[in-house]
Image (tube, rainbow, N blue to C red):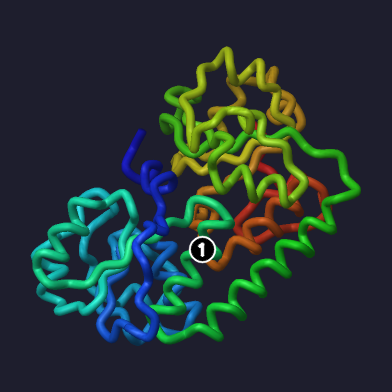
């Protein structure tokens, strides 16, 4: 699986270390797109002095120094920015230990589910002296997701396949979202039924035979492929291909479990249940790029 797809799966974590109240970071480095977005959503973007290599939203974040990716952060560059707080993923214990030995405070966070997102927002709100903003942000996300869930409740669950990555130009080396992915959770909110939702993994490799057996009615494909969705016509027996319900979901918003998850749910809802609605950045059933 390529690095971009790994980023989609390894995004951010709420580590279990106690959060020190009132100990707000003034010079913050955040090493995950979801964490950067939360900091900005809390109104504390002015405290960021460095971010990861993948963040593209909000646009103002792009001016900040890049300190590397999720698997290759540049330790020396991080230190050169003189942070008093570095926010990282909980599974980056080696980096966390190095930073602590260098006297830099770290906060390990997790955003692999909606519950994790709540906890990450609360933890950052505590550390960045933005408790009220954190409560307001979490409440807004809950309310907007509830509205999507309500809009989808009367519809039949639509069988969907979410492709995280595959070989460009072909339907090979396919990786799909499993039952432990936040994408599967959002799909349920939007009235979808992940065809691999019973697999207790965040992602899984999927053979052609398994693809055909899963018979998805809609396919979301996050692959950045110059050929677009054209390779899917090789599997015309799939219901989603036969009906043209193929969705280009390569917009990074789909793979970042951060404050914009309600927009992801709304886009999925339009595709799954509101066939007449055009959605920016997404091919709705009426606008899907058919093979």
Residue 45 percent coordinates (x, y): 39, 82
Quadrant containing the C terminus is: top right
Disc 1: CA contacts within 10 A as few (<14), some (14-19) or many (>=20): many
Residue at the right extreme?
A: 154
> Would residue 188 appear left or right of 248 to someone viewing this image?
right
Quadrant containing the N terminus is: top left
Residue at the top extreme?
A: 209
Residue 199 percent coordinates (x, y): 57, 28
Residue 118 percent coordinates (x, y): 55, 65
- Residue 53 or 151: which is nearer the viewer? 151
Question: Which residue corresponds to the image point at 43% horizontal and 56% vertical from the top-left?
Answer: 110
Q: Is residue 130 above or below residue 173?
A: below
Task: Look at mark 1 in the image and give the residue it sits on.
Answer: 258
- Residue 209 or 102: which is nearer the viewer? 102
Question: Which residue corresponds to the image point at 55% horizontal and 34% vertical from the top-left?
Answer: 178
- Among the 4 quarters of the image, the one containing residue 208: top right
> How many marks can you see?
1
SS type, badge 1: loop
Residue 61 percent coordinates (x, y): 36, 75
């Amino acid at each position: 699986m390529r690095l971009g797809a790994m980023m989609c799966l390894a995004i951010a974590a709420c580590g279990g270390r106690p959060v020190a109240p009132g100990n707000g970071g003034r010079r913050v480095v955040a090493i995950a797109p979801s964490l950067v977005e939360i900091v900005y959503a809390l109104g504390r973007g002015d405290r960021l002095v460095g971010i990861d290599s993948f963040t593209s939203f909000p646009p103002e974040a792009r001016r900040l120094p890049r300190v590397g990716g999720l698997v290759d952060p540049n330790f020396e560059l991080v230190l050169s920015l003189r942070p008093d707080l570095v926010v990282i993923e909980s599974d980056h214990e080696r980096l966390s230990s190095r930073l602590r030995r260098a006297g830099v405070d770290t906060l390990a966070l997790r955003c692999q589910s909606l519950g994790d997102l709540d906890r990450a927002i609360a933890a950052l709100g505590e550390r960045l002296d933005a408790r009220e903003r954190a409560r307001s942000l979490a409440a807004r996300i809950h309310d907007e997701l509830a509205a999507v869930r309500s809009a989808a409740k009367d519809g039949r669950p639509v069988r969907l396949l979410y492709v995280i990555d595959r070989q460009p130009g072909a339907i090979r080396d396919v990786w799909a979202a499993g039952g432990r992915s936040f994408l599967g959770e959002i799909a349920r909110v939007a009235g979808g039924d992940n065809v691999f939702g019973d697999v207790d993994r965040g992602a899984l490799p999927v053979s052609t035979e398994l693809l055909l057996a899963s018979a998805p009615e809609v396919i979301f494909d996050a692959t950045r492929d110059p050929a677009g969705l054209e390779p899917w016509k090789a599997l015309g027996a799939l219901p989603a291909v036969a009906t043209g319900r193929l969705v280009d979901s390569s917009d990074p918003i789909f793979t970042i479990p951060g404050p914009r998850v309600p927009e992801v749910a709304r886009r999925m809802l339009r595709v799954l249940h509101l066939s007449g609605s055009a959605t920016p950045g997404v091919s709705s059933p009426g606008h899907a790029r058919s093979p």
